[in-house]
Amino acid sequence: METLEVSKISTLYKNQKEEKLFGKWITLTDITPLIEKHKDKFTISTIGFSEENKAIYSLQIGSGDKKILVWSQMHGNESTGTRAMFDLFNCFSYANDFFLEKILKECTLIFVPILNPDGAEKYTRVNANGIDLNRDAVNRVAKESKVLRSLLEKLKPSFCFNLHDQRTIFNVEGTKNTATISFLAPSEEESRSITSGRIETMNVIVGIDALLQKIIPGHVGRYTDEFYPTATGDNFQKLGYNTVLIESGHYPNDYQRENTRAFTFYSILQGIYHIATSLTFKEYKPYFKIPNNDKVFLDVIHRFDNKDDVGYLYEDQIINKKLVSNLVKVEDFNISDKVGHHEIVFESKKN
């Protein structure tokens, strides 16, 4: 199992990072001019429209038989994958490296940045009609869900990458490490059988984890593989399209997720490279050695002597066309066993 050279891809990322994208609020307006600059290397298509008639784009590059479909922001307020995607576009458009050429020779890559442009504009998880696209894979009520499914059936990809962001609450089980990148090889049915498709999906995740452990050791987690009957990944996997779920999470003192953006970039690139260079996808057991995600963190905790500690989580809102993060008190559970990304110990507690 071959992993990319860390120093090489670190330099590549530094040189090709798309500096015009920054912060968590990324919209169609932000990416449209950046899509245009890749027209000489990528085939750019409008594959459909959102409920509010915003364009949904795809960018395609490569000539290989292994088709890989990658999409981001099916939840409009989860943009780390989109930023990493445009960093990757710059690599394919402007960098010269043998391993990039190898990928494009072996693979055909199809990217959909911002599947949910209405939700991205409003910075909401759901689309304009309040539908969670990641729970709409069966009924496909939303226009955006129909667009993705139509593209899937047209392309018949060997692998899919479903890019999400996860909350700051997650840690790597058994540690106080943030779960900065988490993975899931979705189940195909309730028994969670280890099917041939899931084995191949797990194998790709094992290949990505092998790289990440060299970069952020101990900060990689794994989601429970509980079957969700209406979820996108579960249904695509069930249909025979191997789907790797990547969740971009918190890294210490990185609330803008710029460090996590780099780790997401490395994850996508390593995953694609692994697919491009592998003849078989059979090694999967190390997948189960990736620790589960747990939920130990709060954003801020005030510590007091009387044990009546108070916890807070950030809540993001668009106010006057700006993204504002406000601390909201946690009311609904005991926080005695929680850890704060930031903790304030009041004077009486210090003595």
Image: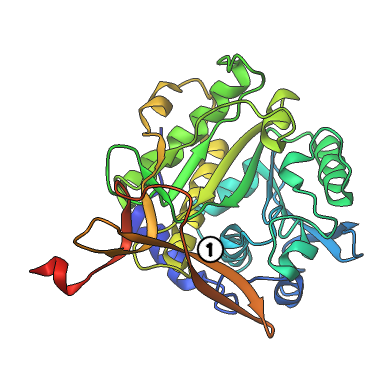
Mark 1 element type = loop
Residue at (45, 68) in percent of width and height: 255
Question: Furthest residue to the front?
Answer: 306
| Image coords of residue 273 (percent x, y) | 52, 44
Of residues 274 and 210, which is closer to you in this image?
210
Of residues 279 and 49, which is closer to you in this image?
49
| Image coords of residue 210 (percent x, y) | 37, 39
| Image coords of residue 76 (percent x, y) | 70, 60
Of residues 253 and 340, which is closer to you in this image?
340
Residue 346, picture quadrant: bottom left
Of residues 97 and 163, which is closer to you in this image?
163
Is residue 316 at least partly visible in the picture? yes
Quarter that holds the N terminus? top left
Question: Furthest residue to the left?
Answer: 351
Above or below, comparing residue 64 to residue 76 in the picture = above
Quarter that holds the C terminus? bottom left
Above or below, comparing residue 342 to residue 75 in the picture = below
In the figure, is residue 124 to the left or right of 91? Answer: right
Residue at (87, 66) in percent of width and height: 54
Is residue 2 at least partly visible in the picture? no
Residue under label 1, please give it: 96
Residue type at mark 1? Asn
In the figure, is residue 89 to the left or right of 146? Answer: left
| Image coords of residue 303 (percent x, y) | 25, 63
Residue 81, picture quadrant: bottom right
In the figure, is residue 36 to the left or right of 84? Answer: right
Q: What crowding class fits label 1: few (fewer than 14 Cα within 10 Å), some (14-19), or many (20 or more)?
A: few
Residue at (67, 54) in percent of width and height: 72
Question: Furthest residue to the bottom?
Answer: 320
What colouring does the structure picture have? Answer: rainbow
Above or below, comparing residue 105 to residue 30 in the picture = above
